[in-house]
Image (cartoon, rainbow, N blue to C red):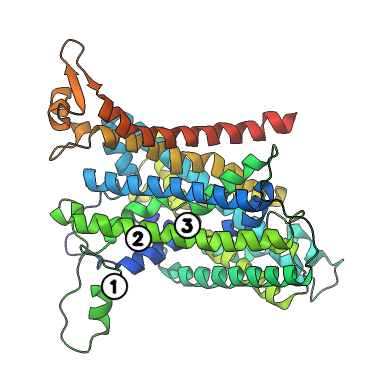
Amino acid sequence: MADTAVTTRLSQNEASEERPVAGVAPPAAESAWGSVFTLSNTAIGVGVLAFPYAFRLTGLLGGLLLCLVVATLEHFTLQTLVRAAAHYRVTSYQAVVERSFGPAAGQAGALLLSASIVVYLFGSLAAYLILLGDVFPRLLGEVVPTESIWTERWVSVLVPSLLTVLPLCVTRSLGALSSVSSLSVVALAYTTFAICFRSIQHVSQHEAGEAMPLFVFTSESVLALPMMAFAFQCHVTVVQIFVELEPSPSFLRCSPKAISEHSNTDAEEPLLIPAPSSALFTSPARLIGMRGVVTTSMAACVLGYVMVGASGYAAYPNDVASNVLNSFDDSDPMLQVARLLMGVNGIVSYPVNLFPCRQALDHLLVTVLGWSADARGVSERHLPLTAALFGGSLAVALVVTDLGAVFQLVGGTAGAAIMFIVPGLVAMQLARHSSASGVSAPDCDVQQRHHLLGDSSALYDSSSGVVQLSLPAVLRMLPGAFVMLAGGLLLVTTVLQNTVMKGA
């Protein structure tokens, strides 16, 4: 889900294309392993807590297969966004959309993408506050009487939100929150270990336990797909991570940045991120290195998710909760520490997610309503937008108690657009322009597109003024079309599941 790394980078890259600032040196390029860490940390969040429940909905083998399918699709879409960024020489997801579909359609698509990002991040904000209501009552129940008001769920959501979360949200800079990423990694790593350890221990002590089917097919099985998709989302920042990757990345050596920082001798200046117009931006070495970054990150996520999902499901195959921590004994010290860490993680990660959500919402309001985009206008809207987002997510957290329901709804709607539908459309455009060089196809006229694409991929009909795609071009577009249709199916299924089926 959207976590500390994703939101920090998103807030720094609202413009469609970055340009060098006079007198300000660009940041040092990142190593391959550093990029793997950042991309993995972007994806991994509290969504991991819902994986045992997703396995319960699909079965042990069914959950494993579905996780692999989701990871494969997301791997394809991430690679697509990287290739598109290299092709169009842009540095943000929104810019990829704008350049892929031309001025008019591209701007409309980027606006819809921004709206989807706002919805997705808002869902993440609500999820963090719901998590507070899951963990703190169980922690406080160890030190105060269970009938005390302090063990009430609404108190555990409201009090920490007002006393700790809200003051952090009013900040106008993320500088003070830059160290949150490390805390999130520690919290999630410990929680993953604790869940797996206690689950294996529980299974070993109950050898003749409940039956654990390999496959489960019910009307609710489809809900596992958006839950898993929610946990793999790192599309918003993959383009920026690609831009910051060193020109010749290698998994067998340290970053030039790290070498220069730790050397006691005179070292060469660290490699700097090239400008979008640089030839290094589309170098084969960087593209190949980024493929390795994406593949390694997705593999690490799959490994961690499957470990948590399979072990948690094996321990409680029939009644595991949508937040697996709620299935374990409240008096277990190891799990209590995990709950505490996840609660603190929710508190500190909330403002980091709110920052870009507020920025994207402000951008949407400026674009749609024509409000002032100058510094004064942004400053005047800072507190009202903060209050609106905080109040809205708090209201959702006080009403909704099922963490899995948030993952399912947000992952199946806004997540479907961000992770599948839009990248699928971009992949189809890339397939059409795969032979283009020098001129971005959306910026040239039909005759130029035909010349760039070549006779092998398209035929130009001068009478109608359109490009007729040949069979090879159509075949290249099929993967993108499949991913787009998969995202559309996920979106429609989620909407039906939460309207028609629940109403019945």
Label 1 vs label 2, nearer the camera: 1
Taking the image as shown, residue 18 lies to the left or right of residue 295, namely: left
Quarter of the view holding residue 281: bottom left
Q: CA distance from mark 1 to mark 2?
A: 13 Å
What residue is shown at x 26% (from left), y 29% (from top)? 472
Check disc 2 and report the residue beneath it: 293
Binning the other alpha carbons within 10 Å of mark 2 as few (below 14), some (14 to 19) or many (20 upward) gives: many
Check disc 1 and report the residue beneath it: 252
Q: Amino acid at mark 2?
A: Val
| Dots 1, 2 in contact, CB < 8 A | no
Label 1 SS:
loop
Taking the image as shown, residue 289 lies to the left or right of residue 332, namely: left
Can you say which quadrant of the picture contains the C terminus? top right
Label 3 SS:
helix
Q: Earlier in the sequence, mark 3 or mark 1?
A: 3
Q: Earlier in the sequence, mark 2 or mark 3?
A: 3
Residue 40 in percent (x, y) is at 44, 61
What residue is shown at x 62% (from left), y 58% (from top)? 309
Taking the image as shown, residue 322 lies to the left or right of residue 374, namely: right
Q: CA distance from mark 3 to mark 1?
A: 24 Å
Q: Amino acid at mark 3?
A: Ala
Residue 22 in percent (x, y) is at 17, 60
What residue is shown at x 35% (from left), y 56% (from top)? 12
Label 3 vs label 1, nearer the camera: 1
Binning the other alpha carbons within 10 Å of mark 1 as few (below 14), some (14 to 19) or many (20 upward) gives: few
What residue is shown at x 15% (from left), y 14% (from top)? 462
Residue 114 in percent (x, y) is at 42, 41
Q: CA distance from mark 2 to mark 3?
A: 13 Å
